[in-house]
Amino acid sequence: MGELLPYQQKKPVLEMIVPHKKGDKKMKGISPLMAVVLLVAFTLAVAVVIGGWLTSVSRQETEIAGEALLTQVNCSKAVLSIIDVTCTDTDLTIAIANLGPIELTNPSFYARLSNGTSSTWSTTATISSGGQLLDTTSPNWDGGTLDYVSVTALCGGASGISAERTGIGDAC
């Protein structure tokens, strides 16, 4: 029984799993100091990349939010006014003006007679700041005593700006 087999020899477990020698040469690795330096350099490189991306995204979002806020501020100053309403047995004409600092688009009209019948229509017109629009498009207009008129236009593509007039009666 003299010599022990390799698995019977008392060697540290780590040495059996990862031998320190390969043939006659010792395996070499990097020093712990170099490992720390490389780890810190890698971490900083990742931080720089993520920081640059985050800065770019936040700048874009800030610009978008700023433009939306500017549109909301300008739309809060928008003023739509019904200048004149005239009608005949076959036509209803509504003249509107944009008295605010921002253009208004796609005005839609609503007219109600005193007997309760109503007519609605819209256009794709743009009313520039300080501009006026005269609209005589009134489908289903049969004449009668006009009781109420309202106009709504879009500001900045989303917000609705309205104007209305009541008690028109004698003008029609």
Image (cartoon, helix red, strand yellow):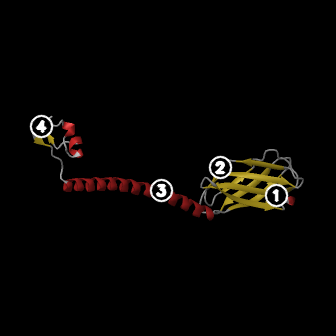
Q: Which mark is residue 95?
A: none
Amino acid type, mark 1: Tyr
Say which element carries label 4: loop
Q: Does the CB distance between marks 1 and 3 fall below 8 Å?
A: no
Q: Nearer the viewer, mark 3 or mark 2?
A: 3
**Percent position (x, y) of residue 157?**
61, 52
Picture residue at 28% right of the left edge, 52% below the top: 42
Q: Does the CB distance between marks 1 and 2 fall below 8 Å?
A: no
Crowding at mark 3 (Cα within 10 Å: few <14, some 14-19, many 20+)? few
Between 121 and 35, which is closer to the camera in this rendering?
35
Between 11 and 84, which is closer to the camera in this rendering?
11
Quadrant, the N terminus: top left
**Percent position (x, y) of residue 147?**
85, 58
Crowding at mark 1 (Cα within 10 Å: few <14, some 14-19, many 20+)? some
Residue located farthest toward the right when viewing the structure as drawn: 115
Q: CA distance from mark 4 to mark 1?
A: 102 Å
Earlier-in-chain disc, 1 versus 2? 2
Q: Which residue is mark 2?
A: 125
2 versus 64 height, above or below: above
**Percent position (x, y) of residue 11?**
19, 44
Quarter residue 60 falls in: bottom left
Q: Which residue is mark 1?
A: 148
Q: Which residue is mark 3?
A: 61
Earlier-in-chain disc, 4 versus 1? 4
Say which element carries label 1: strand
Q: CA distance from mark 2 to mark 4?
A: 88 Å
Q: CA distance from mark 1 to mark 3?
A: 44 Å
Q: CA distance from mark 1 to mark 2?
A: 22 Å
Amino acid type, mark 2: Ala
